[in-house]
Image (cartoon, rainbow, N blue to C red):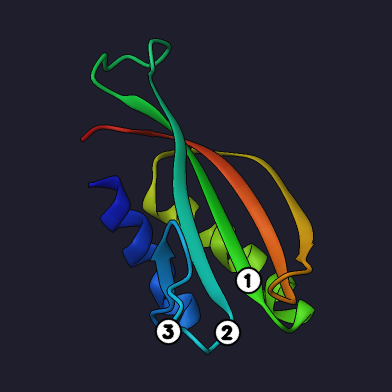
Amino acid sequence: MIQKKIFNSLKSLVDGRCFYGVIPETNKQFPVIVYDFPNVKPNLALEEGDLDDFLVQIDIYSNNPDDIFNLRKLVFSAISKEFEYAERINDFTDYEDDTKLYRRVINYTIAYKE
């Protein structure tokens, strides 16, 4: 499953603090990586008709802005090693006032066969 492949490729970058959807309230250590799948659609452009395009959002959160920049390229490398068809769409920095955390948002389109 694509969820497990993403988790396995990213968990070592943050000592296992890689989560689907949200950061658990029990987590007190940073940085963390959170990934989600906002959209999935059939990929008609590739040869294999059973591939899907997954829009994958990967967020890096930390109370130290250096962490989000240092992890950025490591995430790029991990995703490109894990998936044959992964295209980075964009990435940008944000700050969450309510949590006081810096955030790096990285969006990918990944073609994957379940």
Point out the residue furthest to the front here. 98
Q: Amino acid at mark 3?
A: Thr
Which residue position holds label 2?
30
Callout 1–callout 2 Cβ contact below 8 Å: yes
Q: Position of residue 68 (x, y in %)?
A: 69, 72
For marks 3 and 2, give the one nearer the viewer. 3
In what element is the residue under mark 1? strand
Callout 1–callout 3 Cβ contact below 8 Å: no
Which residue position holds label 3?
26
Callout 3–callout 2 Cβ contact below 8 Å: no
Image: 4 above or below 65: above
Image: 72 above or below 13: above
Q: Residues within 10 Å of mark 1 (few under 14, many from 20)?
A: many
Q: Amino acid at mark 1?
A: Tyr
Residue drawn at 55 percent across, 41 percent down: 108
Marks 3 and 2, how far apart at CA: 12 Å
